[in-house]
Image (spheres, grey):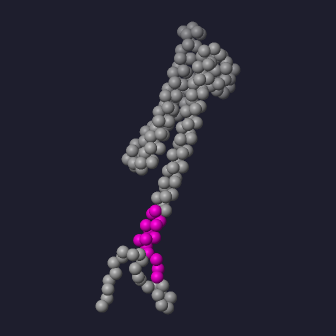
Amino acid sequence: MDATQEREFVSKKFFENLNELVKFYRTLLELLRKEKEVLILADIKRLAQINKDKEDLIYKIRTLDLNRECCAKELVQVFQFDLPVPRLLEIARLMGGAEGEHLRQIHATLDVLVNRSFNLNKENEEFTQSALSTLNGALAEIKGTLAGKPVYGQKGKMAVGPEKAGNFISKEV
């Protein structure tokens, strides 16, 4: 394989990896939107499935990102760029031309997708925390209702009496 063919092969592999990464981030964004809908509906079964899918997708994204780093290092080596830590925009600047412009577009797309995913995930987390707080308050109220309140009788002793309306009371004759 001559130098030109090697450059084309490495470039093609790098662009394919980046396009896969964009595809998976778009899928993640769509999954986060579905998660928000499911959180609003409080559908626990669908939420569990979405969380499993999200974990699988994040694992795939991490794997692709590690692969992207390896491809970037290989690309820098083949093109003989002097970049100790290859960054997408720096590679685009050094490549120039149509390939460089395409890399800048991919970078912009990834940047938007990552930011939207981060913000949507943060909104979902805030929504979940709010729901949990409301649920904890409701559970505390139920606990208070079931536990009853002490009623003090004469001489400072605890007297047992009806705690809330609706309790059954025995009538002694």
Quick check: 135 above or below 36? below
Quick one: quadrant of the C terminus? bottom left
Where are the magenta residues, as a range? 138-151
Q: Quadrant of residue 47?
A: top left
Main SS class of the magenta portion in the image: helix
Residue at position x 66%, y 27% in the image? 85
The N terminus lies in quadrant: top right
In the figure, 5 relative to 30: above or below? above
> What is the x, y in percent for residue 115?
58, 36
* Front one among 4 and 159: 159
Place of residue 5 in the rendered image (x, y in percent of width and height, measured from the top left): 55, 10
- Of residues 43 and 8, which is closer to you in this image? 43
Q: Residue at x 64, y 17 (%)?
A: 95
Q: Is residue 54 magenta?
A: no
In this view, the residue farthest toward the front is 165
Q: Position of residue 44 (x, y in %)?
A: 40, 49
Residue 143 covered by magenta stretch: yes
Indicate whether 26 appears above or below 154: above
Q: Position of residue 14 (x, y in %)?
A: 55, 21
Q: Nearer the viewer, residue 8 or 51?
A: 51
Q: Is residue 170 something that shows in the picture?
A: yes
Tell me if 55 is positioned left or right of 102 in this view.
left
